[in-house]
Image (cartoon, rainbow, N blue to C red):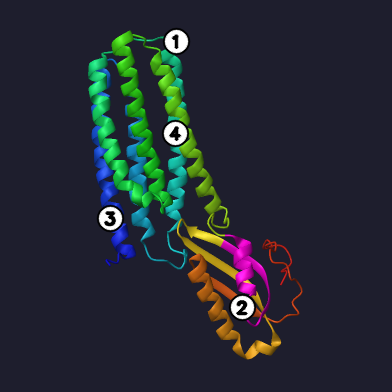
Amino acid sequence: MEVHTHQDVDRAVKGRLTLAVVFAGVIFFAELVGGFLFNSLALLSDAAHVFMDVFALGLSLFAIHIAALPPTEKRTFGFHRAEVLVSLLNGLTLLLVSLFIFYKAYTRFIEPQEVESVGMLAVAAVGLVVNVVVALWLSGYARHDLNVKSAYFHVMGDAVASVGVIVAGVIIYYTAWYKVDTIISVFIGMIIIAGAVRIIDEATHILLEGVPRDIDLNEVLEGMKSTEGVSGIHSLHIWSICHNIYALSAHVDIDPAHGAKQGEILHTINERLADDHHIFYTTLQAECTSCESEDVLRDIAHKERKHLH
């Protein structure tokens, strides 16, 4: 069985994102030129959409490079959060693109213009094929990487937009009903907004130190408490450093009768956390059973306030 290291995965993602940037750039220029040649507002709008995607894909590629930088004295966790920040920025740009599409749909409904549907269809068809290929390249990594997922949604938004342009072109060709572009554009905008909201929600959840979506805090708590020699757990915190790096800190009350096995108990807890929940970065503080607070979840005091523990 072939084993892929983290470096191999990063290298593969970089290669695919680089190709995605190149192909998205080609689509942008093709739709920009085609929009002017065929008087297609839909193609021009999609060209602006693709331009934002070139920017977003470039940011995603940049994030992978900066996340690989080593930790420093000022940033001891390294630069992994750069991936999350870029994902948040990508989500916000998706919202802006959606607003742009709605605006263009409105103007197109008010003042519909004649469009050369054949040329419009040809350019949109090429864009659709390229976007589908790029989406397939990214899909496998998008399931586990928030940064790649945000780029994937950008590409999928392009693909859906291309389908919308094709549908509008066919209808215009046979009926000359130019207002159909308004309906298609609004539909595209709604799909993009849905993807943007998901990305923003995931990114802000990480930035706010939320418990990872696939981890049940109570399940983790019960597993830790079930370790022999543990009489209680308090001050428990679980968070994500980035999309796939989880961390945990907790105070572990050790039964005095097992005090001599303190190191062994903490080691057992760490192994369980890694095996059962993919939590590899932990800070466990062993304590007596007579601590002032037994709260599992505790408030964090601000600097100017009295230290609680």
Tell me how far mark 1 sits from mark 3, CA to CA: 47 Å
The answer to whether residue 114 is visible is no
The residue that mark 3 highlights is 12
Identify the element where label 2 is drawn.
loop
**Residue 141 image position (x, y, % from top left):** 36, 52
Q: Is residue 169 above or below residue 134?
A: above
Identify which amino acid the numbered label 3 is placed on: Ala
Q: Which residue is mark 2?
A: 227
Inter-mark Cα distance, 4 to 2:
47 Å
Q: Does the CB distance between marks 1 and 2 fall below 8 Å?
A: no
Q: Earlier in the sequence, mark 4 or mark 2?
A: 4
Please name the amino acid that badge 2 sits on.
Thr
Q: Residue at x 45, y 21 (%)?
A: 103
- Residue underneath mark 4: 192
Depth check: 67 or 242 in front? 242
The residue wearing badge 1 is: 110
Helix, strand or loop for disc 4: helix
